[in-house]
Each structure stands twice: as structure tokens, then as C-alpha cells.
């Protein structure tokens, strides 16, 4: 039985992850948050006591070691993840990171910690199985269509999402840019801005949209649109739990992607 810890355990995603992990036979070994410290996480999220108190992230390394945690699941915010992931890696714990908005410097620091401490990690902007297929489709389309087609990416999320553009939109842009030999990214447009050899990326925020992503390949006489729409956060939760079970048995010192999990 995989022993998993969740950071941000009392939040929306953390609560859903704990429920799903227990339902799929995982053991919750530790829970971390800045609220409800000392309370049983099961009681906090409404499933009844499970004998695991909420701990402060200030005690992350110690609690992870004492609890025998194998994998830490983190869907929090970039500043917290960038601070906590190296601590978890130093404690010998594998990582599942779904936090978006990480800078290239933060990603490099996390990768270095994974390699240095010989643990394994999955870092992905989106844990949906459908998005994994979406990424494959846009890669194939970009390789076929090449530079004869302009590319625009539109993403929409709920009005509480902090970062923009979404990590998924950025991953899509990076996949397409690589296939097309390198493209500049333009984030929205205003004023006089003739289109160049670029990928346009646009963010919409409103209401309770879980997550919509559309990639448009636009030619002179036609266009192709490839779209993924998330109807529930459960799709991300299921993928994260799948990845957590998978990563503990993988070769260490490597950062994997969700595409590796889905192979």
C-alpha cells in the first residue's frame, strides 16, 4: 500500500485528492496545511477520523521521515511548492507536483533536488488523461501543418485562478513551438501589433469554469481547432493519484511527465 502525504490538504484539491486516494487503497501518512493544524485530517474533510493530524509545513521534513511517507502530492502555489519540494526530496520522498506558475528557475531548483537526493518526481501542468491525448494531437497537427499555419491558443478558467496563462496553455505552446522549429510567444494583443512568426496565447477568467483549452491552427482557407474541456476537477485528482501510485516504483533521480505515466 502506497503511503502518501498531501500538502494543502484542507483546500479544495487537497480534500479531493485525499478522498480519492483512500478510495483507491492508498494510505494517507501525513497531511500539511496552514490551517487546522493538530486536527485529524479525516474529520476536517468530513470522512471521519483517520488518525492523521494536520501538520504545519514548517515541520515538513521531520513529519515526512517519521511517517514513512513514500510520495508527497502538491497542488498548492508556486512560492510554497518551490520551498517545500526540495525539503521533501531531501527527506527521501518522491514527488507529484501539479502546481502551475512555477518559473524556470523554480523548476530547475526542484529538478536539481530530485537528482541530488535520488528520488523520483512527476511534474505536470495538467494530470487529466484527456489532456495527455490533447497534447499528442496538437503535436501531430503541428508536425503535419508546419509554418504554413498560424497558431493561437485560448484558455479559460474560473475567476479564482491566480496565474495566467495556465500551465496547460504554456505546455501546449511549448510542444507546438518545438515541432515548428521555435516560435515567439505573444500574450494577448493591444494596439498596433501585426502578426509575426508567433504563437498567440490568450487567457479568459470567469465564473466557475474548470478548464477549457483550444488550439487553433489557422490557414488561408481553413482552420483546425483542437479543444479539451474539463467538466470536473475529479479528472485532475484521478490522474494525480494514478501518478502517485506509479512514481514510487520508477527509476530514481528523474523528473517524469504525465505522458510517461500514461505510456
Image (spheres, grey):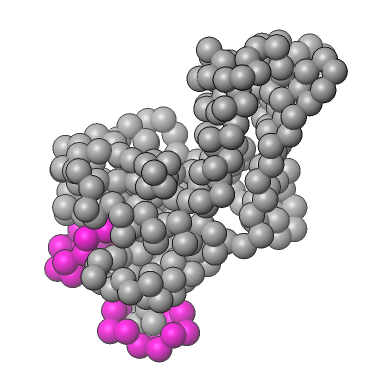
The residue at 44%/85% (across/down) is 47
Residue 218 versus residue 8: which sits nearer the camera? 218
Tell me the magenta residue range: 43-72
- Point out the residue furthest to the bottom here: 48
**In the picture shown, does residue 237 fall above or below 141?**
below
- Whether residue 161 appears in magenta in the rendering, the answer is no
The location of residue 169, given as percent across then percent down, is 60, 37
The residue at 71%/60% (across/down) is 208
The location of residue 240, given as percent across then percent down, is 42, 57
The residue at 30%/46% (across/down) is 121
Quadrant assignment for the C terminus: top left
Quadrant assignment for the N terminus: bottom left
Q: In the figure, residue 4 lies in which quadrant?
A: bottom left
Q: In the figure, residue 74 lies in which quadrant?
A: bottom left
Using the rendered image of the protein, determine whether residue 231 is visible from the camera's viewpoint: yes
Residue 126 versus residue 137: which sits nearer the camera? 137
Amino acid at each position: 500500500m502506497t503511503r502518501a502525504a498531501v500538502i494543502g490538504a484542507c483546500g479544495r484539491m487537497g480534500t479531493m485528492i485525499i478522498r480519492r486516494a483512500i478510495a483507491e487503497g492508498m494510505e494517507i501518512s501525513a497531511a500539511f496545511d496552514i490551517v487546522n493544524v493538530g486536527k485529524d485530517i479525516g474529520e476536517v474533510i468530513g470522512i471521519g477520523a483517520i488518525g492523521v493530524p494536520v501538520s504545519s509545513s514548517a515541520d515538513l521534513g521531520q513529519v515526512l521521515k517519521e511517517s514513512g511517507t513514500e510520495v508527497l502530492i502538491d497542488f498548492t502555489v508556486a512560492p510554497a511548492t518551490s520551498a517545500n519540494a526540495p525539503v521533501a526530496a531531501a527527506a527521501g520522498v518522491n514527488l507529484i507536483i501539479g502546481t502551475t506558475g512555477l518559473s524556470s528557475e523554480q523548476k530547475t531548483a526542484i529538478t536539481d533536488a530530485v537528482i541530488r537526493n535520488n528520488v523520483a518526481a512527476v511534474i505536470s501542468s495538467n494530470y487529466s488523461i484527456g489532456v495527455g491525448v490533447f497534447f499528442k494531437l496538437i503535436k501531430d497537427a503541428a508536425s503535419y501543418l508546419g509554418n504554413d499555419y498560424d497558431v493561437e491558443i485560448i484558455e479559460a478558467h474560473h475567476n479564482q485562478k491566480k496565474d495566467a496563462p495556465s500551465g496547460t496553455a504554456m505546455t501546449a505552446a511549448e510542444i507546438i513551438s518545438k515541432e515548428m522549429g521555435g516560435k515567439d510567444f505573444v500574450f494577448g494583443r493591444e494596439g498596433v501589433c501585426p502578426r509575426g512568426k508567433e504563437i498567440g496565447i490568450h487567457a479568459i477568467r470567469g465564473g466557475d469554469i474548470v478548464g477549457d483549452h483550444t488550439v487553433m491552427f489557422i490557414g488561408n482557407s481553413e482552420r483546425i481547432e483542437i479543444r479539451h474541456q474539463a467538466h470536473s476537477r475529479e479528472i485532475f485528482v484521478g490522474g494525480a493519484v494514478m501518478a502517485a501510485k506509479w512514481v514510487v516504483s520508477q527509476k530514481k533521480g528523474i523528473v517524469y511527465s504525465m505522458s510517461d505515466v500514461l505510456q
